[in-house]
Amino acid sequence: MTYEEFLDEITTLLTEMYDLSDEAAIKLVVDAQANDYFVTHDDKEELRSVEQAKIEATALYTAKQNKNETQRKQQQRQEQKKKTR
């Protein structure tokens, strides 16, 4: 599949597997692309498969969830510090 088809597949999988809106899934893929996450996939056609798209969709979603959780915990710590002052 082409690089563009591969990114479209990841976007579709994000909406199907994780019930994300089209906009949220597109943003995840575009942000990853902007951070050069898919450079290897662009260079190596064998990495652009449906199976690999599933792996990448899972990785992107998991990374986003981990980032959100970390931010939530940081905010809680900041709030606790303010309360103890």
Image (cartoon, rainbow, N blue to C red):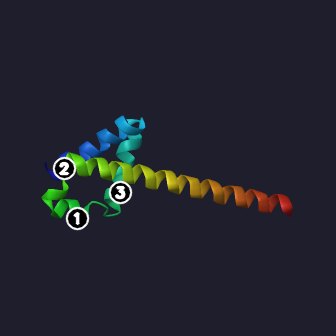
Q: Amino acid at mark 1?
A: Thr
Residue occupying image coordinates x 14% and y 50%: 2
Of residue 14 and residue 52, the one placed in the foreground of this image is 52
Of residue 9 and residue 49, the one placed in the foreground of this image is 49
Which residue is labeled 3 in the image?
Answer: 32
Q: Nearer the viewer, mark 2 or mark 3?
A: 2
Q: Which x, y percent locates residue 69?
A: 57, 53
Q: Label 2 to label 3, Cα distance in Å?
A: 18 Å
Asked whether the viewer can see residue 20, the reply is no
Q: Amino acid at mark 2?
A: Ser
Asked whether the viewer can see residue 44, the reply is yes
Which residue is labeled 1 in the image?
Answer: 40
Q: Secondary structure at mark 1?
A: helix
Relative height, residue 40 to residue 13 (above, below) = below
In the drawing, does residue 75 fall left or right of residue 44?
right
Q: Label 2 to label 1, Cα distance in Å?
A: 13 Å
Q: Are marks 1 and 3 in contact (CB under 8 Å)?
A: no
Residue occupying image coordinates x 19% and y 57%: 47
- Specify few, some or many for label 3: CA neighbours under 10 Å numbering under 14, 14-19, or 20 or more: some
Mark 2 or mark 1, which has the lower sequence index?
1
Q: Secondary structure at mark 3?
A: helix
Which residue is labeled 2 in the image?
Answer: 49
Q: Which x, y percent locates residue 12?
A: 30, 39
Relative height, residue 46 to residue 51 (above, below) = below
